[in-house]
Image (spheres, rainbow, N blue to C red):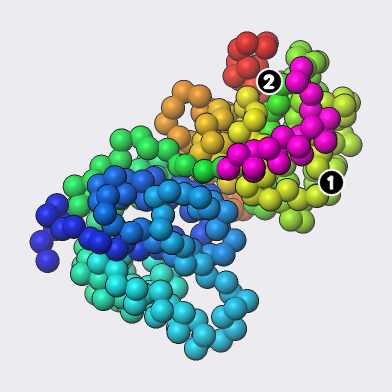
Amino acid sequence: MSADLRSFIPKKILICQLKQIGDVLLMTPLAELLARHYPGAAIHVFTEKKCLPMLENNPYIARVWPVDKKALPTLGHELAYYRKVARQGFDLVIDLQQTPRCRWVVGFSRARVRLSREAPWYTRWLYTHRIPVASGYPSAMKAALLQPLGITWHGERPRLFLTEDEQAAADGILAGLGLHPEHTLVTVDPTHRRPTRRWPAASYARLLDLAAERIPALRFLLLYGPGEEEEARALAAACRHPETLLLPDRVISLRETAACIKRAVLHLGNCSAPRHMAVAVGTPTLTILGATSTGWTYPSPEHGTIAQGLDCQPCNRNTCNDRHCRCLTDLTPEAVLPELLARLPALS
């Protein structure tokens, strides 16, 4: 088949992106680009159940096909579900991940066009078009697969569509935690399951204390996920100014988190899903980098990063060769403070 697909007009499109939560959110510009280019097409997404909150109320997506592992206890159940998804009459299938589950769906589909990046020799036959992908911001990398269709990424950011009720519920959460109109909200994401991407809790505690001493009106909402409550409480216990902290007594949902971030003047944290959620709701960010490169940062001045700048950065590893993660442990709160204050220009 010709590599030039600009005359191809699909009526039904499937995007395959199973995980992670942040990656699924970073995929949303593709749905927007495809919907604008093919206004009559129905766009579906194949993803994991845990990622559904990133796609709810998205006007560019007609249907989401979630993978619920608990509902698929055997290989037979899995294959039956993948076949059901694939046989929905798709003209175009875009595989962003090439996981075994995605490959099953691609293989079962009868789509005329099946796009993906370069694949191993033993799966190349699954795809009608394989597109080399350059480095860069993940949404741009994903959108590069659409080039044969005549579609180009022009800086479209991830989008997360919150309802008025969801925003009102978040306002209630924040008010219940002690946020008042005279306060200035900063959301803080201090946790990460990978030590090479987690700035020490003691460093966060010191930074928040320093910032609060400079700007007493600041209030910091500490975000945490399942199993991370003790980390958040330990950070709070280390702060000299606990009155500036807003610590939920439960794990707030992903969409509640996004709605709270939308109310903030800044999102501060490690390189994980909440930083992408901030981009998706229009909140500026400051991300503390360890192993991660700056390539994950949306290319706009309101989204910044800070790193120690060691020769080994970025290594993109989940474990540190010297076990000390000096890129993070050597980065002091005093070094981060000026960058944080500079992103609060009306207050500092």
Q: Which residue is mark 1?
A: 249
Image quadrant in which the N terminus is located: bottom left
Give me the residue at 39% from left, 80% from top: 83
Which comes sooner in the sequence, label 1 or label 2? 1
Mark 2: secondary structure: helix
Quarter of the figure with residue 175? top right
Residue closer to the observer: 153 or 190? 153
Q: Position of residue 315 (x, y in %)?
A: 51, 45
Q: Residue at x 69, y 28 (%)?
A: 186
Which residue, given by chain and number where applicable, does mark 2 sit on?
Answer: 337
Quadrant placement of the C terminus:
top right
Instruction: State how far apart marks 1 and 2 are (Cα).
Output: 28 Å
Q: Which residues are magenta?
A: 163-183
Disc 2 residue type? Leu
Q: Is residue 74 left or right of residue 82?
A: right
Amino acid at the residue labelled 1 = Asp
**SS of the residue at dot 1?**
loop
Q: Does the magenta run of residues contain 167?
A: yes
Nearer to the camera, 194 or 228: 228
Depth check, front residue: 76 or 169:
169
Task: Assess whether residue 166 is covered by the magenta stretch.
Answer: yes
Residue 39, image x, y percentages: 27, 50
**Which residue corresponds to the image point at 59% horizontal and 19% vertical from the top-left?**
343
The number of discs equals 2
Quadrant of the image occupied by residue 278: top right
Relative vertical location of residue 247 with respect to residue 22 in this rendering, above or below = above
Say which of 64 and 214 sits in front.
64
In the rendered view, tell whether residue 8 sits above or below residue 333.
below
Q: Main secondary structure of the magenta part?
A: helix
| Residue 347 visible within the image | yes
Q: Crowdedness of circle 2 by 10 Å Cα count: few (<14), some, many (20+)?
A: some
Residue at 18% x, 57% y: name it.
9
